[in-house]
Amino acid sequence: MKKSFSLSVHEEIENTEKRTDKKRAFVRECFLKGGIISNPSRTYHLEFTVDEKNAQKLTEILFFFGLHPKKIARGGQFVIYLKEAEEIADVLKIIRADKSLLAFEEIRVEKDIANNINRKVNFETANINKTVGAAQFQIEAIQFIARHAGLSVLSKPLEAVARLRLKNENLSLTEIGEMLEPPISKSGVNHRLRKICKIAQSLKGEKE
């Protein structure tokens, strides 16, 4: 009985592999007859153009392999398509298009690296613009106080920060904090500059 059981399990595995190979062959045949894959450097898109009967079968097989294809009618036929990079790569694996898969993955990696660099550059640019804008607002507030009341109206800690900011417009808050005696943290400098800006706003209100 044990030998018979082992044999049946082996046969079942073989049969499953054969059925899977047939499914792969069907997907490959559909792709060769009516498959298109876009340039991945521009967009991710793979589609099969098939008749109604094969559309249903192809959809079921792609679901069998864990994919999530979409289907639309076009010109009397059906288009089965995928737009996710991972799933397109899986189709290339299914049909064993090894060279195409390698080329696809190389372009995909390059595209992901370029996108990550662009995101970082955009993030850093936004932070720089935000920092520059905040510094300009602080400088204008300090200059307004200097013109209309004199920096001496500020408390000694606020006056020290105000004078450093005017003389060093491009310094970061951390660098300004390190120049003070005694040095203070970035948040401490920011807190003092906020107070200075509020004082400037109050003076503007009085002038108006």
Image: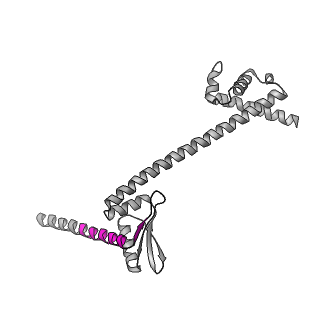
Q: Horizontal placement of 20 versus 207: left or right?
A: left
> Considering only vertical position in the picture, is 76 above or below 84?
below
Residue 162 point in image, percent of width and height:
73, 26
> Considering only vertical position in the picture, is 165 above or below 77?
above
Query: Majority secondary structure of the magenta segment?
Result: helix
Coloring basis for residues: one colour
Q: Horizontal placement of 26 versus 201: left or right?
A: left
Residue 39 point in image, percent of width and height:
44, 60
| Camera-nearest residue between 10 and 173 | 173
Within the image, what quadrant is residue 35 found in?
bottom left
Within the image, what quadrant is residue 66 found in?
bottom left
Residue 99 among those drawn in magenta? no
Residue 57 point in image, percent of width and height:
36, 75
Within the image, what quadrant is residue 129 found in?
top right
Q: Horizontal placement of 16 versus 182: left or right?
A: left
For the C terminus, give its image quadrant: top right
| Furthest residue toward bottom | 76
Q: Residue at x 71, y 22 (%)?
A: 160
Q: Residue at x 70, y 28 (%)?
A: 192
Residue 20 point in image, percent of width and height:
28, 68
Q: Which residues are magenta?
A: 17-37
> Considering only vertical position in the picture, is 186 above or below 83?
above
**How many numbered callouts?**
0
Q: Residue at x 64, y 30 (%)?
A: 173
| Furthest residue toward top | 181
